[in-house]
Amino acid sequence: MKKIQKWSFLGLGILLLFGAVFFVTLKKPSQASVAVSPEVGYRVPSFTLTTYPGNGSVTVASDVHKPMLINFWASWCPPCQAEAPDLEKAYQKYGQQVEFVGVNLTVQDSLPAVQNFLSKYGITYTTALDKTGEVASEYKVVAIPTSIFVNRSGVIVDRYTGAIPPQYLDSDLQRIEQ
């Protein structure tokens, strides 16, 4: 009788363990249930801005299906100037797999200066104009340049403030590309 009780308790324990594992994996949150915030581990906040040149617009949404690099910059910013050639080079390499959006802090810049910057550094990826500073504020940009790396599920995987060294830029782009 003691053997039967021992095996019954062991069987019940194993059954409870499998049930707990099943319940935990069933309750695992999906990417869609991740909160929106401009921080690593959260879904990217949505915005729509006018593009330059032209009167088009670009929309960044938390339901992206393509990895994305969002780079906040201004033409007068020396670190922004320093990283601009590396960003364009990265765009030439990864632009088919990763969407690049440069967000100019136009509230602190001028359109002629933006045009000059884009021409000088040969920037060919999408440039958006944050004319009011609302998007930079929502993204908690306290210094520029600030770069946000977003995976194809719309989750921010890295945030970098300052000019990105080329090796970090390359490794983060490879990481979100997958």
Image (cartoon, helix red, strand yellow):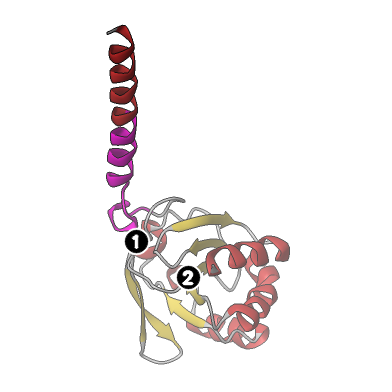
Q: Position of residue 73 (x, y in %)?
A: 54, 68
Quadrant, the C terminus: bottom right
Assess disc 1: are there few (<14), some (14-19) or many (≥20) residues with their C-alpha within 10 Å of its C-alpha: many
Name the magenta segment's main secondary structure: helix
Q: Position of residue 72 (x, y in %)?
A: 51, 66
Residue 73 in view, yes or no: no
Quadrant, the N terminus: top left
Most foreground residue, 33 or 85: 33
The furthest residue to the top: 2
Q: Quadrant of residue 145?
A: bottom right
Residue 17 in view, yes or no: yes
Most foreground residue, 131 or 4: 4
Q: Position of residue 46 (x, y in %)?
A: 32, 66
**Circle 1 sits on which residue?**
45
**Circle 2 sits on which residue?**
67
SS class, disc 1: loop
Q: Tell me the magenta residue range.
A: 17-37
Task: Please name the amino acid that badge 2 sits on.
Answer: Pro
Most foreground residue, 174 or 110: 174
